[in-house]
Amino acid sequence: MKDRSIIAVVVGLLWNEEKKILFCQRPDHKSYPLKWEFPGGKVKAGESSIEALRRELEEELGIISTNESFFYIETTSYSDGRTYRVEYFDVTDWQGALDNREFAQITWVDPTRFDKFDILEGNTTICAMLATLI
């Protein structure tokens, strides 16, 4: 029988000075291939959400987050049966230069332009929300 537990995930909404947000394309060899998403990942046992966010940003982008604040939380069930509880954090300051270590590509996007991307199913609500804030 499949485990139907909820998977805890953290996501960083990285903003630059032009009010663009970092958008990342998943690699073609991972689940949900070539879909666009925000950086982040699963929370490991014993980690706080902030610890997980900082770890994921360092692993994926080679940066050290120095200023993050809670933005939004939602639970999303995917068509493949997986359910995720996703905590989104605004990240407005970090140390180091962005170094794409995991994604097919990364780019800075005006939030009103998310409709030009093939967005990961669970990110459609947050993308629509962010587009209204600019």
Image (spheres, grey):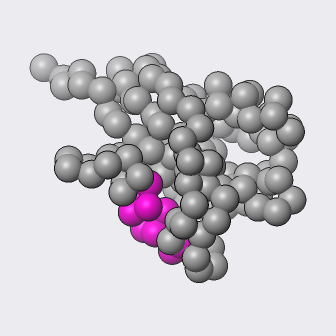
Residue stretch rendered in magenta on the structure:
53-63
Q: Residue furthest bottom?
A: 96
The image shows residue 37 at horizontal and vertical percentages of 60, 45
Q: Position of residue 104 (x, y in %)?
A: 59, 61
Q: 79 above or below 132?
A: above
Quick check: 28 left or right of 31?
right
Evaluate whether residue 28 shows in this view. no
Of 76 and 120, the residue lying toward us: 76
- Residue at 30% in and 27% down: 6
Q: Position of residue 53 (x, y in %)?
A: 44, 54
Position of 133 with respect to 27 (left or right) is right
- 60 versus 122 height, above or below: below
Q: Which one is nearer the viewer's eye here, 93 or 24?
A: 93
Q: Residue at x 56, y 32 (%)?
A: 72
At horizontal 82% and vertical 29% (from top left) the residue drawn is 132
Image quadrant holding the N terminus, namely top left
- Of residue 25 and residue 63, the one placed in the foreground of this image is 63
| Camera-side residue of 96 and 50 | 50
Let me know if residue 53 appears in the view: yes
Q: Residue drawn 64% across and 25% down?
A: 125
Is residue 65 found inside the magenta-colored segment of the image? no
How many numbered markers are drawn?
0
The answer to which quarter of the image holds residue 113 is top right
Residue 127 x %, y %: 70, 33
Looking at the picture, does residue 9 appear above or below residue 16?
above
